[in-house]
Amino acid sequence: MGMWASLDAMWEMPAEKRIFGAVLLFSWTVYLWETFLAQRQRRIYKTTTHVPLELGQIMDSETFEKSRLYQLDKSTFSFWSGLYSEIEGTLILLFGGIPYLWRLSGRFCGYAGFGPEYEVLVTIYADYIAPLFDKFTPLPEGKLKQEIEVMAKSIDFPLTKVYVVEGSKRSSHSNAYFYGFFKNKRIVLFDTLLEEYSVLNRDIQEESGMEPRSDGEGDSEEIKAKVKSKKQGCKNEEVLAVLGHELGHWKLGHTVKNIIISQMNSFLCFFLFAVLIGRKELFAAFGFYDSQPTLIGLLIIFQFIFSPYNEVLSFCLTVLSRRFEFQADAFAKKLGKAKDLYSALIKLNKDNLGFPVSDWLFSMWHYSHPPLLERLQALKSSKQD
Ligand SMILES: [Zn+2]
């Protein structure tokens, strides 16, 4: 009875109070949910004390233990900092902090050197302009190039050129990608993927008169030892397997689907924004009774009003992206590359493993790319057929 009565009372409140209450309630719901997930993940850190079997050859137990303790520390810290910022945010909302900060920022605006424009510029530079200066070299004629062309042809990929780009300087976890419109596509391989094909490695192979064998088992112990002492790249077959995954994204239409989704999302957001920006009760809910500054409208609508939508959307996109990754892996497997992709993934993730075990629910909510272990397990389970 009491609950219904108070719900009724809430419903009779003015619109701006209801909006405010809903925003606050949602913010705490998300906070509690995230905390719940973090606790689940924390339990994994506490109980997983041995390196998973699949990673035995690339991670020793000392590194594993160090990373485990570090993650435990980090999770304690983020628990307290998360609690602090949630309470801080709530207090700011409750005590009308946004109008206060807005007036304050008006006063200090003149002093600020870098605004948000600065950040946008940096992002644009890093994402779109810096790559223009990367060194693209055509992949030299040879076995690898031939094999790439054969594979592209076998799945009707309209390949025109294959490039190698110096990717080692930037921290990017992509190893290969393609670009170009319609019937004119290029494949770009990061040089880090091709380590064994760098000049140094080729010398070693020529010196001992050995071509890498297609089954990947043929390297003599001597070469293995030499190669091992350097940073490891991928063999021909592994490079092809990684490419098989990337081309899977193309063949299965993932790229197009992503573009369509993001276009639809922008359209929807602008449309809703246009509808909502004129609503005075939205401003009133956050303490702006007699003025409706557009910047504040942006903040309120995108940060608070859209937040349920954003949570749902970002979860759906995460799920979708993981599906796409598994599908692309399965595609590579259908091309007969499960084994090579398996070993390539292990090599490529060697240096950025962090703590490799995660709680399934935590992982499902947070990781748009499936963790290495999950991908390996999926590849292994599909290896049988
Ligand atoms: Zn992928």
Image: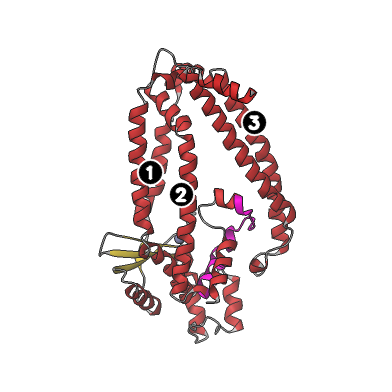
Q: Which residue is mark 2?
A: 317
Furthest toward the bottom, the residue is: 209
Task: Give the mark nearer the N terminus: 2 vs 3.
Answer: 3
Give residue 152's position: percent from left, percent from top.
34, 72
Separation (CA) of disc 2 from disc 1: 23 Å
What secondary structure is found at the residue carrying circle 1? helix
Can you say whether 64 is above or below 111 in the image? below
Q: How many marks?
A: 3
**Residue on which the image places disc 1:** 124
Work out whether 10 lies above or below 380.
above
Marker disc for residue 75: none
Q: Which residues are magenta?
A: 339-361
State the image quarter where residue 158 is shown.
Answer: bottom left
Residue 196 percent coordinates (x, y) = 49, 73
Residue type at tag 2: Leu
Which residue in the protein does label 3 denote? Answer: 84
Residue 342 sits inside the magenta stretch: yes
Secondary element type, mark 2: helix
Q: Nearer the viewer, residue 319 or 209?
A: 319
Say whether marks 2 and 3 touch (CB < 8 Å): no
